[in-house]
Amino acid sequence: MVTIQETELREGILSAIRLAKETVQPVLVSEVQKIADIDPFSFFNAGREQFLGERFFWKDPDSRHIIAGLGNCRLIQHDGVRGRFTKTEKEWNRFIETAVILDEYKTSGTGPLMFGGFSFDPLKEKTGLWSKFSDSHFHVPKYMLTVAGGQAYFTSNVICTQHDDADLYEKVLQERQIILLAQKQPVLPMPALQEVIEIAPEEWKESVSELVRELKDSPLKKVVLARELRLRFSKAAEAESVLFRLLKEQQGSFIFAFESNGDCFIGATPERLVKKEGNSVFSACLAGSIGRGADSDSDEKLGRSLLEDQKNLIEHQYVVDMIREAMEETCDEVIIPATPQLMKMKYIQHLYTPVIGKNRRGTPIFSLVDRLHPTPALGGLPKKLAVEKIREMERLDRGYYAAPLGWLDHNGNGEFAVAIRSALLQGEEASLFAGCGIVADSDADSEYRETSIKFRPMLNAFGGNNL
Ligand SMILES: C=C(O[C@@H]1C=C(C(=O)O)C=C[C@H]1O)C(=O)O
Ligand SMILES: [Mg+2]
């Protein structure tokens, strides 16, 4: 059993209610407590009954932060393109400005925190597929479990209004007790996968060939084109069944699930967009791909050939150059190795160059997200022309695929991944997405095969066979 000791929560709530009455504004109380280890997946899973549709899960590749959130105490969302990063940031800052924070540990990823992201391209015509997600969409959870540095922390976020009284404290205690005592739930098996529909594969290859012709004589150097698989199950699939498999099979990835209004965006991406911890900023260049070998010899051979392949090195270098430029605008020191290394995932290996910077004082993570997104790994080069090309050429409504997804805490620390190797789960159906960087030297058939490999992690997690 997990128990939470003595609490200052009651006092915090009473003072927040007084402040709410004075200011006629809701006031957040956030309390952080250390607790005995709870498994974050079980916490997410046990939250199904009370909080289905209002949950999120996050794990980075090194498990430095595993965060699971239940319930929404505040939704911060904006539609449209104009200033969505700054609008979100301002609203968040206003929200936490008056917050009463009871936290003696001051660990990043605990206390007031919002989880969510930004759609890939708010100017792309919408199809309805992503109707449950706004162009900028963040949740502040009611209850949150954070495992950081191997220690578990439990955050309770309570909104106090001018109409509340001391009863609110009792209500929170009761609700919290139910959550913490919730029994481990069995993970249901995935329902049978009845159909896998490849959306317009021939047209996709034609688009690639057309684009390649264009790239040979154009200021455009690289454009990432993506495609979609639509899956149909025998009955509604549960996010935790998919999440369970991803946690087992994709340990070296960022693993995320983000529920909104009945749908769930879920995935296992190897790609960091940006992480900020104090003054340190981390990003990653990931582009250039090849499959894994059947044995270690052939795998090494494939890896070596990727490290020497001109087409892939060029595809990669575009990303390095752009990220360097964006980082240098906001960082005093930027360290980037001269040559890429290999990042090996279960089904694929990539060219990878890590990036570290010392943040110039006061640059918030959203300015970095704004500058970096989309990098040429997901958009292309030059950025604006490439995004316009994607908007014009791609049949897909990317929504949150390939977009920044992650968290920001009240001290300005946070991390955003690039949400690739991902799927939108909608009850009995799901859409999977995969794309690849098209350069002047690309070949439509081999790019097609590359996307097929990139579907595999999610297809497997959904119980499908390989294409
Ligand atoms: C676009 C995707 O992956 C991106 C494209 C890559 C490539 O073309 O080599 C490699 C890694 C990712 O940055 C995807 O997985 O959907
Ligand atoms: Mg590629």
Image: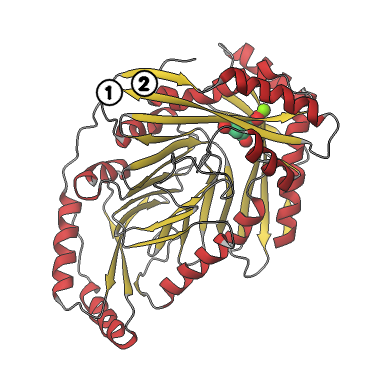
User: Neighbour class for label 1 at 10 Å: few (<14), some, many (≥20)?
Assistant: some
Q: Amino acid at mark 1?
A: Pro
- On screen, residue 71 above or below 299: below
Residue at image point 16% right, 50% down: 181
Residue reaching furthest to the bottom = 22
Residue matched to label 1? 191
- On screen, residue 202 above or below 32: above
Q: Is residue 285 visible?
A: yes
Count of numbered marks: 2
Relative to 314, is 444 on the left or the right? left
Q: Position of residue 76 (x, y in %)?
A: 42, 61
Quadrant of the image where one finds ligand 2 = top right
Q: Amino acid at mark 2?
A: Gly
Q: Is residue 331 visible?
A: no
Residue matched to label 2? 463
Q: Mark 1 vs mark 2: which is more N-terminal?
A: 1
- On screen, residue 41 above or below 165: above
Residue at image point 61% right, 63% down: 279
Residue at image point 19% right, 45% down: 49
Residue at image point 55% right, 29% down: 434
Rendered image coloring scheme: secondary structure
Residue nearest the viewer, comparing 200 with 280 = 200
Task: Tell me if label 1 and label 2 are in contact, CB under 8 Å.
Answer: yes
Q: Position of residue 210 (x, y in %)?
A: 73, 25
Quarter occupied by residue 110:
bottom left
Residue nearest the viewer, comparing 443 with 328 = 443
Relative to 336, is 398 on the left or the right? left
Residue 449: numbered disc = none
